[in-house]
Image: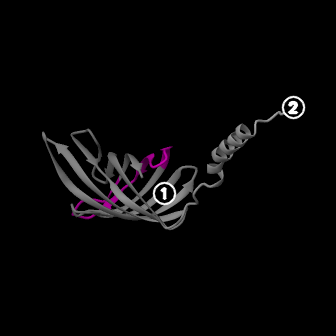
Amino acid sequence: MQYFNKPLTLFLFSIFVLIGQPAYSQAVETFPKITGYASIMHPIVVINKEHTSTNFDGYYQVLFPFGINIWKSKKIGFSIELAPGVRAENGSSKMNSLLIHPGVLVNLGKGFGFAGRLAFETSGRYGVTPVLSKLIKKNKGSAFYIATPMPVRFGNQQPGSFAVGFQIGISF
């Protein structure tokens, strides 16, 4: 009495090996690694010694940050970001500044990240921008994230300011 059909047994064994294979042959991440991203950033509040202003209170401002990240390792990298800003006020809108934003990236683990950026605006302002981010959904070739940028700015004959914003984006 024969309990196993040899061709069927070989076929099922082959399927089992092929299905199990990706778990054993996953690609090892290599560094340096280059990634990119695009996002939308809404300033929420801007505070300086003269006044506090909020977005949507007499004006609306939005930035469109995009950039390239070069990861040296899984924990640390370098990023260069460009962020054109558009401001709508008094019935008209215009691009009011381009932000050049180089910085250091730190992977904090569990989907959290930190970017410490220098800031150079074509409007004449400069400063730093610490950014905390959180990975929301990771796909095969992309990931969605949210972030909280906290810009500190000086220059252009304006008082120093601190702001908090909300950013949502996709990295690839």
Please rate how many residues cluster around mark 1, counting C-alpha atoms within 10 Å: few if below 14, some from 14 to 19, many from 20.
some
Q: Is residue 45 visible?
A: no
Which disc is residue 1 wearing?
2
Q: Residue at x 22, y 64 (%)?
A: 124
Q: Quadrant of residue 97?
A: bottom left
Span shown in magenta? 134-162
Q: Is residue 153 visible?
A: yes
Judge by depth and name the residue closer to the eye, 150 or 81.
Answer: 81
**Residue at the right extreme, as displayed:** 1
Which disc is residue 114 wearing?
1
Q: Residue at x 66, y 53 (%)?
A: 24
Percent of width and height locating residue 87:
21, 47
Q: Is residue 111 magenta?
A: no
Give the spatial CA distance, label 2 vs label 1. 67 Å
For marks 2 and 1 on the same chain, the one whose residue lies earlier in the sequence: 2
Note whether 59 is above or below 151 in the view shown. above
